[in-house]
Image (cartoon, rainbow, N blue to C red):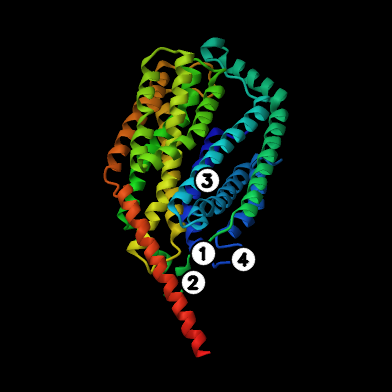
Amino acid sequence: QLDPFYASIILFVGRAWDAITDPMVGFFISKSSWTCFGRLMPWIIFSTPFAVISYILIWFVPDISRGQVMWYLVFYCVFQTLVTCFHVPYSALTMFISREQSERDSATAYRMTVEVLGTVLGTAIQGQIVGKADTPCIESPLFFGMTNSSVALEELNMTHDTGSLTDTRNAYMIAAGVIGGLYILCALILWAGVREKRESSELQSDEPVSFFQGLRLVMNHGAYIKLIAGFLFTSLGFMLLEGNFALFCTYTLGFRNEFQNILLAIMLSATLTIPFWQWFLTRFGKKTAVYVGISSAIPFLILVAVLDSNLIVTYIVAVAAGISVAAAFLLPWSMLPDVVDDFKLQHPGSHGHEAIFFSFYVFFTKFTSGVSLGISTLSLDFAGYQTRGCSQPSEVNFTLKMLVSAAPVVLILLGLLLFKLYPIDEEKRRKNKKALQDLRGESNSSSESDNTELASIV
């Protein structure tokens, strides 16, 4: 019932607002005080119920004619803000559950495995519930004849609107309720099972550093900038693949009834191979895992574009892409704590900036998502894409091949070249680990000495 132009405006403004809220939330978290639940956990718990309510209201169709655009814009932005209040502290929580690099890497592997599994589960639930009220495709106007095509299309839309609009509304509301219930359940499990550990150095009364001073320190940290730059290009490549693969399967390959199963194969492959990549990075190092894991998708991306439509080959490519996606999911979050440790060694008197590292990485990831959406939308629109069409012009099929094959391959190669500049290899990680242990030992000794002096005075 909403004009596609206004829907695009809502999505664009919502994504822009979503990107802005990441550094904002990072700022407020950096100013947060420790509580009996920790510094990050209150953000997660208190944002959860409001996020669920706003999510359900996004899918609710208000009985107003002129205010629908504002309704969806407001609640979409509110939902994005509340999800950011959950996701930024949730991502930064890795730094506060253990001081050991191996334990943090293991926790990251578990987190990403369950996160991908949750994506699969959410996609399956949403697809099964909403799929029962799915809308049919629309034939090209040539199918109806040039003289009465507009009348035929109007009659088709009127018939569809009358017959299934109510069912579609109900399906989306049911799906929103189920997803919201899972959201609350996961937040409760997190609250009950995870405890934050406070660094002993943070207990000392060092002079606090302002957010903008901390931001300047973080953004001037070379390892962080090089890590972000590399993953920006590789992430953009995978986002182009992810965002256009369904259209590619539907129109270019002709697998309209199979694309959901193909996407499921990608996600299941990613879920099952995250533990393998965790073992691989432990055995051979994280930079090696980046080169091997992310580059492994390149030959298969070329293969699916070169060969003719073949369902078996498509499934093979889907599984291979999932293996590479698993590495792309896991490795950034596994390498960010190493960058934070390196920062702490270079700035031992500066504390509480973990949220800035993670929030700005999320910000750049969302920025990349917006760039991917813009590239895809403009490219397909320029090629003559027909919304809900049963078939597409040959120019659209060629564009989809470029978006899921050539463009991702080029972007992945650029990202891998940038990773050559990333300075933290396994030897550097071991040195940082030992230096941090020595620094913590000195901090603990200083604290014990202060306590002894205070006791003697008393």
- Indicate left or right for 455 with 210 as reference: right
Residue contact at pointers 1 and 2, CB within 8 angstroms: yes
Identified at 30% across, 54% down, the residue is: 222
Residue type pointed to by label 2:
Leu
Which residue sits at x=29%, y=36%? 414
Which tag is nearer the camera, tag 4 or tag 3?
4
Task: Please say if the residues under marks 3 and 1 sit with CB atoms less than 8 Å apart.
Answer: no
Residue 368: horizontal and vertical position, in percent? 41, 41
Q: Residue 255, image x and y in percent?
A: 52, 16
User: For the residues marked 1 and 2, what is the alpha-carbon distance in whole angstroms?
Assistant: 8 Å
Query: Residue 70: percent from the left, percent from the top?
Result: 60, 46
Mark 4 neighbour density, 10 Å: few (under 14) some (14–19) many (20 or more): few
3D distance between C-alphas at marks 2 and 3: 39 Å
Q: CA distance from mark 3 to mark 1?
A: 35 Å
Q: At label 1, which amino acid type do we have? A: Arg
Q: Disc 2 or disc 3, which is closer to the eye?
A: 2
Q: Which residue is mark 1?
A: 198
Q: Secondary structure at mark 2?
A: helix
Alpha carbon distance from label 4 to label 1: 11 Å
Q: Label 4 amino acid? A: Cys
Query: Is the residue 359 above or below the residue 69 in the image?
Result: below
Looking at the image, which is closer to me, 21 or 298?
298
* Residue situated in front as seen by the camera: 29 or 322: 322
Closer to the N terminus: mark 4 or mark 2? 4
Q: Quadrant of residue 442?
A: bottom left
Q: Secondary structure at mark 4?
A: loop
Q: SS for tag 1?
A: loop
Q: Which residue position is annotated with label 3?
A: 14
Real-space Cα separation, disc 4 to disc 2, in angstroms: 15 Å
Note whether residue 94 is visible: yes
